[in-house]
Image (spheres, rainbow, N blue to C red):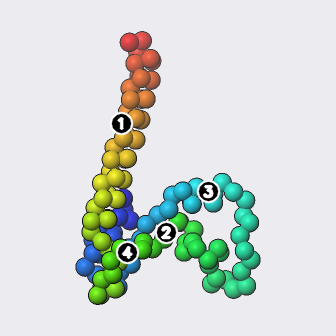
Amino acid sequence: MEVLAQNIANADTPNYKARDIDFRSVLAEAGTLSTSMKTTNARHLPDGEMPGADGMRYRMPFNTAMDGNTVEMSVEQAQYGKAAAEYQATLSFLENRISSARKALRGD
């Protein structure tokens, strides 16, 4: 949600590139052994695809802007709403699990 908020905050910044995190590729990479290509220079990207170890990627825009900014407010707002709903669902699930454990400990 922080990355999406940064994208929204920089919607009017010239040449700002919208970023996102690809959780699936980060989890997949974390669960596999390192079979990446060998690099000949410390500044080479490990697989030619991942810009950083944190899973950050640049989002490809549907429409190009004249100032080089790739933030599209409708996309960012939709992604933020989706992330907020998923976060709320996770909190509700955890709250229900904790509530069940409390009831069991109290003998209700």
Give the camera-side residue of 12 and 59: 59
Image disc number at residue 92:
1
Quick check: marks 1 and 2 in contact, CB under 8 Å?
no
Quick check: marks 4 and 3 in contact, CB under 8 Å?
no
Give, as a three-letter code, the residue at label 2: Met
Location of mark 4 (residue): 61
The image position of residue 92, as x and y in percent, is 35, 36
**Mark 3: which secondary structure?**
helix
- Residue under the point 27% across and 65% down: 74
Give, as a three-letter code, the residue at label 4: Pro
> Which quadrant holds residue 63?
bottom left
Q: Tell me the distance, in whole angstroms, between the alpha carbons under discs 2 and 3.
A: 14 Å
Give, as a three-letter code, the residue at label 3: Ala
Image disc number at residue 56:
2
**Of the two numbered discs 2 and 3 in the rendering, the one whose residue sits closer to the viewer:** 3
**Of the two numbered discs 4 and 2 in the rendering, the one whose residue sits closer to the viewer:** 4
**Mark 4: which secondary structure?**
loop
Q: Earlier in the sequence, mark 4 or mark 3?
A: 3
Location of mark 3 (residue): 28
Q: Tell me the distance, in whole angstroms, between the alpha carbons under discs 1 and 3.
A: 27 Å
The image position of residue 21, as x and y in percent, is 47, 63
Left or right: 37, with 96 as reference point: right
Above or below, comparing residue 97 to residue 57 in the picture: above
